[in-house]
Amino acid sequence: MHELGMARSIAAIVAEHARGRPIKTVRVAIGPRACIERGALAFCWDIVTESTGLAGATLGFVEAEGDTFTVKDFEIREDA
């Protein structure tokens, strides 16, 4: 299940750029040939982020082309 490694990488990228700010949503762009199972990635995301500064942040998906897989953007939580 390479989605676990992907979830860890996404969390590390977002945590680095968030600089301690609370995150509401993270969106990743995934193309149809990226060989990423969205359900498995979402499951792994919840496991990887629990007990971290990203706990509670939702993982959303954006359609992309080909084998694209990238962190599209993230949203800072305003109520914190």
Image: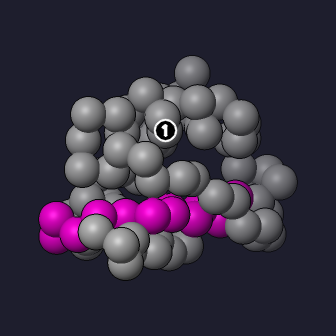
> Residue 42's spot in the image, x, y percent?
60, 39
Q: Is residue 7 left or right of residue 52?
A: right
Q: How is the image coloured?
A: one colour
Quarter holding the N terminus is: top right
* Residue beneath the point at 35% across and 34% down: 50
The kind of residue on which mark 1 rests is Trp
Can residue 70 be seen in this snapshot? no
Q: Nearer the viewer, residue 77 or 45?
A: 77
Image coordinates for residue 15, horizontal then vertical, percent: 25, 59
Identify the residue at horizontal 37%, vertical 78% (top origin): 78
Q: Quadrant of residue 7?
A: top left
Identify the residue at horizontal 64%, vertical 58% (top origin): 60
Q: Position of residue 12 (x, y in %)?
A: 28, 52
Name the quarter where the C terminus is drawn.
bottom left
**Where does the magenta region start and end?**
19-30
Instruction: Confirm whether the magenta stretch covers residue 24.
Output: yes
